[in-house]
Amino acid sequence: MILPADYRPSTAPVRYEPDPGPVPAPVRYDPRYDDPVGWETEQPAGPLPGQTFRVKPLLVLAVLAAVATGIAMFADVATIEPDTQPTWRLNDFGTNLTVAGIVLALAIIGGALAWCTGFRWGAGLAGGAGIGLAGWAALAIGAAETAVTSGWPPGAPRTAELTRELGYWGLAAAGGLGILVLLVSLLRAGNDRRAGLDPWVAALGAIATLAAAIGPLIPLNDANLDLNWSSPPGADWPTAYFAARFVCLGLLLVGGVVGFLLVSRYGLGLAIGSSLGLGWLTLTAATEQTDRPIGPAYWNPGSDPFADGGTKPYVVTVAGIGLLLFFGVVAAAMALIDND
């Protein structure tokens, strides 16, 4: 072969690039599995196509809590003797307690089912309803213990012997299982890689929760603040009465404030679920829709529970519960718009 006269052989090294092969398609993050499968793409607004319902431990615990709630609602809670009405059921201590239990049982089951379908807010709703169940059970147990020595509810003797029946232990089991559902749901409280809720709405919801929890503690009719932890003159309220009040309000405070300040869909479900039962008690007691309703924490210090309207919630309680649920609805609507 004849080369041109000006040909110069190249001395530059020859580099060979390996064939990278086929590029894998990007994967998405699926919130229904514990391990993330991708970090670069956005999480879809809802369950991924083709994914099916999976039974998870949260659902099993929620079903057990709902069963315990049903036992508490329909079985005898206590036998009080001597008494003209020896057998007491849940509605004998407050005529709006049974429906509140039904609302909470439906919420805890619905939230667990939503989580089994892949919605993180469902875990929050189940955990919040678990908080509500614990507070509801505390109120009912405190009322049963109070009926032995105080004469409340009307018709109960002032000195008697209490025999705890199946419904009483159903209440205790429902409260304990509700707390267990909350603890299990907290494992799903992480960042779901979606835009957070509006911080202003979350802050206002937390403030409303604070007002709802403080409202039942405000003394009325020139009563002293220490009636929140001590009996009025001439009465002997048992320790269970005061404990039930603080447990109920403390759980509401934790569920609402923490839930809103998480600024996530899980937190939103937690806040709404924890307020549903007390929301029903507040609504029925404020409008006097049943014969002998009770409000959150029974009534305010200084009120006369034996008088008509004596258990009617104070205006601060009504406003706080109402605003809590309102801001919860607003945050849910904004989250739905964000998904779209």
Image (tube, rainbow, N blue to C red):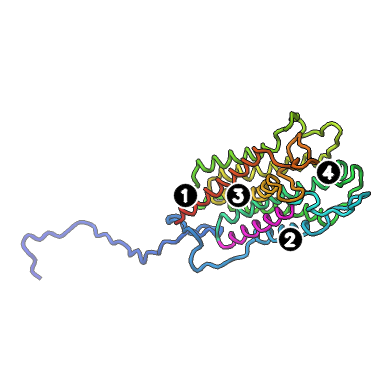
- What span is colored magenta in the figure? 97-117
Name the element at disc 3.
Answer: helix
Residue type highlighted by circle 2: Val
- In this view, 218 is above or below 182: above
- In this view, 262 is above or below 107: above
Name the residue rendered at 5%, 62% in the picture.
5
150 with respect to 271 (left or right): right
Mark 1 sits on what residue?
195
Inter-mark Cα distance, 1 to 3: 19 Å
Place residue 307 in its image quadrant: top right
Mark 2 sits on what residue?
67
Main SS class of the magenta portion in the image: helix
The quarter of the image holding the N terminus is: bottom left
Q: Nearer the observer, disc 4 or disc 2?
A: 4
Viewer-proximal residue among 172 and 31: 172
- Counting residues from the start of the chain, the first of labels 2 and 3 encountered is 2
Name the element at disc 4.
Answer: loop
Name the disc covering residue 272, or none.
3
Mark 4 sits on what residue?
152
> Does the magenta segment cover residue 103?
yes
Inter-mark Cα distance, 3 to 4: 31 Å
